[in-house]
Amino acid sequence: MRVSPQKARLVLNLIKGQRVESARNTLAFTKKRVAATVGKLLQSAIDNANFLSTEKGLDVELDNLYVKSAVANDGPRLKRIRPAPMGRAYHYVRRIAHLEIVLAEKNRNGAEVDSPHPVHRTSGSPAKPKAKPHVKAKSKTPSKKKAVGKKATARK
């Protein structure tokens, strides 16, 4: 979305951890421009969870869904120029945010339901799997310390 990630995070932090219906009501009465887009994204996540429960045969109770995480990451930046007095130019940056919402299911007692697949993940761009950090194997032989050389005295 064409909004700065900082502004999007303000709205996403309002709905983190809330039940889906409560989050929809919060977004409906929030006076931020990004709230309408986040509301559409949340509705898409709910529809995808509904699709999983009806078409794919996964056991998802729509009344027990809550917003597990909501993230706004930086997207590419658009660098623009505005004319300024005396032939100069002002440079400014148009920021883009990638929004991501993850829903999960809770029992009535508040415990998270274990499911074989995550309920839903919706974002502006497809989620990439995180690469595992490369770990070097340690050698079994101890390393030798280098001998410290003497400093040369300065001549006058």
Image: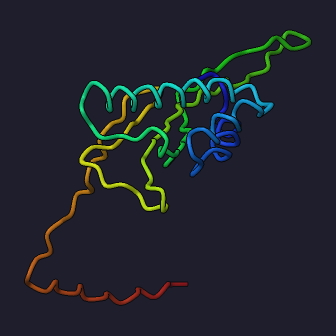
- Colour setting: rainbow
**The C terminus lies in quadrant:** bottom right
Is residue 9 positioned above or below 92 on the image?
below
At x 28%, y 49%, the residue is 115
Residue 136 on image: x %, y %: 18, 65
**The N terminus lies in quadrant:** top right
Residue 28 on image: x %, y %: 72, 30
In which image quadrant can residue 42 be found?
Answer: top right
Residue 111 on image: x %, y %: 43, 62
At x 74%, y 22%, the residue is 91
Most extreme residue toward the right is 85
Is residue 149 positioned above or below 12 on the image?
below
Is residue 57 positioned above or below 84 on the image?
below
In which image quadrant can residue 85 be found?
Answer: top right
Q: Nearer the viewer, residue 97 or 150?
A: 97
Q: Nearer the viewer, residue 89 or 43?
A: 43
At x 65%, y 47%, the residue is 13
Q: How many marks?
A: 0
Residue 57 on image: x %, y %: 24, 32
At x 68%, y 17%, the residue is 80
81 sits to left or right of 51: right
60 sits to left or right of 97: left
